[in-house]
Amino acid sequence: MKYLLTMGALLAAAPVAAQTAPPAPMPAPPAPPQVFAPIPAPDYNSDAGWLCRPGRKDACAVDQNVTVIAATGKAKIVKFRADPVPLYDCFYVYPTVSLDASPNSDLNIGPEEKAVAASQAARFAAKCRVFAPMYRQVTLTALRDLMAGKATTADRKLAYLDVEAAWRNYLDRDNGGRGVVLIGHSQGAGILKQLVAGVIEQNADQRRKMIAAYLIGTNVAVPPGGDVGGDFQRVKLCKSVQQFGCVVTYTSFRADSPPPENSRFARVADKPGMVAACTNPAALGGGKAVTDAIFGTKGAGLASAPMGPWTTDNAPVTTPFVSVPGLISAECVSNGGFTYLAVTVNADPKDPRTDTVVGDVVVNGTILKDWGLHLIDMPVEMGNLVGISEYQAAAWRGIPMKEPKK
């Protein structure tokens, strides 16, 4: 505003000759938005409509071996084994990853969809059959336009209706009365939140089949101190691994970098009187706990800084994933109107293991603190998420597993 007033004063004081000079050329009008051909709806009766389906070689049947690096720096490789006879199902919806130029993605399975499925969904095959539909998601191109204040024709309803159609197809064609864990991150979690609230909650049979919904990296509204009554009217927050038919949800931030005022996560400003829910998979009953974090060996992707050496001797890591027992702790906290998963790196400069992990969103060398640790929302608790799904599925079947002593 000060700049505009100053410019106005200069123009008012300018001599008449200056005011009668030829006007500067008008800026060119903004280019009209690019028009894209409609993308046909997915056919979920066809294998091509699915990113992952059990019994085939696809994005969820990839190398999940882990190098476990102890605080001493000693490393060992733990080989992944998918359950040959899984007793329950997992229905996964991936986050915003499409690099397509169109505002809604096509249905071609690209490297970005394959990579995120390998990072977020494939590990669940150790316990369940994994189903993951392709869908016409809002793309990263559209997200960038929105963040820049540009108009976009991205259709969120189109993305949701695809996933709802895939869900109904799965129930009709594949479910056979089995229990199912719904898993989503970011845009995928938001779509599943809508599916649970608008469809599953309203249908007693579908509600009975839902072992749990893991809605990670999205805001789920609850009353302060409550576990139901905001976004969901029947489905409660999970408070125990023996509880089923419930929701696990959180958004993550570094404990020493809480959400700034402009954060897009950890509060529900559009729902007065409500707060964002937070459930810690490592301690569903509450409190701070060491997590079973499993990270990508090379880091958190293109929007993040690359991961440096995992140990001071820069020993090569040959597996796609790394586990760092004891390095990460997490706790649900409320601070300044935000409720979130506070993630602590238990750094020890005296030991040979890394003292940091990457996962912040970085643009042009600057960390976007309002995004928190969105890129590693799931990796910081990946082992815990897979583990609690098995406990909750057993409780759903009526044969609860005995919890290990801590």
Image (cartoon, rainbow, N blue to C red):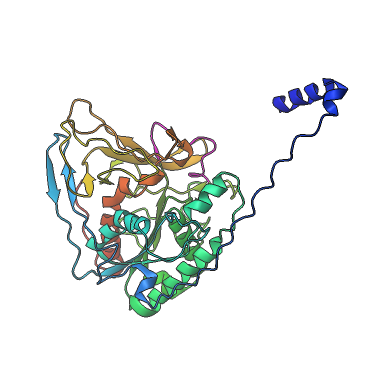
Residue at (58%, 46%) from the top-left corner? 269
Snapshot quadrant of residue 213: bottom left
Principal secondary structure, stretch drawn in magenta:
loop
Q: Is residue 402 magenta?
A: no
Residue at (12%, 45%) from the top-left corner? 76
225 and 54: which is toward the camera? 54
Q: Residue 30: x, y in percent?
A: 66, 48
265 and 273: which is toward the camera? 265
For the view shown, which residue lies furthest in the right direction?
16
Quadrant of the rendering where the C terminus is positioned: top left
**As displayed, is residue 54 above or below residue 96?**
below
Judge from the rendering whether residue 266 lies leftward or rightward of residue 305; answer left or right: right
Residue 274 in sight: no
Snapshot quadrant of residue 356: top left
Residue at (38%, 55%) from the top-left corner? 238
Residue 253 in sight: yes
Q: Which residues are magenta?
A: 253-267
Q: Residue 13: x, y in percent?
A: 83, 20
Q: Residue 344: x, y in percent?
A: 33, 35
**As displayed, is residue 13 above or below residue 245?**
above
